Amino acid sequence: MINLPFIYTFPISGVTTSILIPPLVSFLISFLCASGGISGAFLLLPFQVSILGFTAPSVSATNHLYNVFAIPFGVYRYWKEKRFYYPLTLIIILGTFPGVIIGYLLRISFFEELKRFKLLVGLVLLTIAIRLIYEFFAVKKETKFSSAPPKTLSFNWRKMEFTYSQETFKLNSILISSLAFFIGIIGGIYGIGGGALMAPILLAFFRIPAYVFAGATLAGTCITSIVGVIVFALGGHPPDWLLGLLLGIGGSLGLSSGARIQKYMPQKLIRIIITGAVLFISLNYVISFFK
């Protein structure tokens, strides 16, 4: 057995582990996920639950806190390189913001029993994974990275149209916000803010390239996670502040580094990363329900 240094028991969660483990794990996860506009929180939850043994409702609040600490560094990188698309960010936030509050209320009532909670998350992620796998083989031409940012042709409460890499994309603003609302509910239950579900949906069902939505989904996740931390804390389920900080330190480094290298990654590889992560967690959670 390996004797890890700096063993510490976190007083709020009761987790006992080396203080080096949380930031190391969060760095690796966030680095891989950043290119797809995902913070990695949806992979950190099973790590906290299954590895660290943190199963109380406040584990969701701690996941939100990780997002609050880590995501701004990734968003800053996209913004600095002029790869942050504001219209898409706005319609995502308008949907997920109220949804995450409803998600909290469901998390501390119906989904307080962890087994049902994990089954819900698993089924949602499995549906998205199946679509991503289909798209992987069905899409013959992937959008290439362009140093020029998306150019908005029209944007209002009904529709959004923009060009990127010599391609034109059309989105129904109401539909995206409505989806973001329901995703926000699930994200509020799960403790991820909703962006980790929005990113694969934009990729799988709307074929929006990750080069466009990555900054937007990260920003939406960060803002809704701030709300998540507040409502969990006010509701008597505060996060483990120190554990969340350590996770956030690793995540900030990973997201910043991952965002930096995204422009060098082909869309196909980004799709594989997102699909693999979603499929692994979904199967793990669905199977665990029947054990």
Image: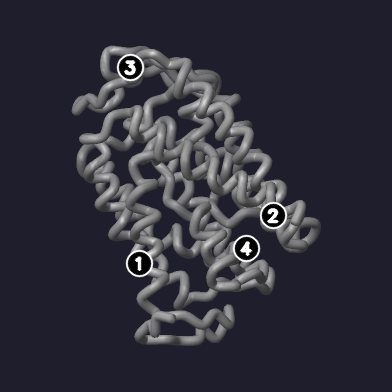
Name the residue that disc number 1 marks. Answer: 24
Name the colouring of the figure: one colour
Residue 195 lies, in percent from the top left, at 50, 44
Which residue is depicted at the point 55% across and 64% down? Answer: 229
Which residue is depicted at the point 59% across and 25% down? Answer: 174
Residue 219 lies, in percent from the top left, at 41, 46
- Marks 4 and 2: CB-CB under 8 Å? no
Tell me the crowding category of disc 3: few under 14, some 14 to 19, or many 20 or more residues within 10 angstroms, Cα based.
some
Name the residue that disc number 3 marks. Answer: 163
Tell me the crowding category of disc 1: few under 14, some 14 to 19, or many 20 or more residues within 10 angstroms, Cα based.
some
Q: CA distance from mark 3 to mark 1?
A: 38 Å
- Of mark 1 and mark 2, the one earlier in the sequence is 1
Of tags 3 and 4, the one toward the viewer is 3
Q: Secondary structure at mark 3?
A: strand
Q: CA distance from mark 3 to mark 4?
A: 38 Å
Examine the image and state in which quarter residue 288 appears: bottom right
Q: CA distance from mark 1 to mark 2?
A: 26 Å
Q: Quadrant of the C terminus?
A: bottom right
Q: CA distance from mark 4 to mark 1?
A: 28 Å
Q: Is residue 26 left or right of residue 103?
A: left
Name the residue that disc number 4 marks. Answer: 231
Q: Amino acid at mark 4?
A: Val
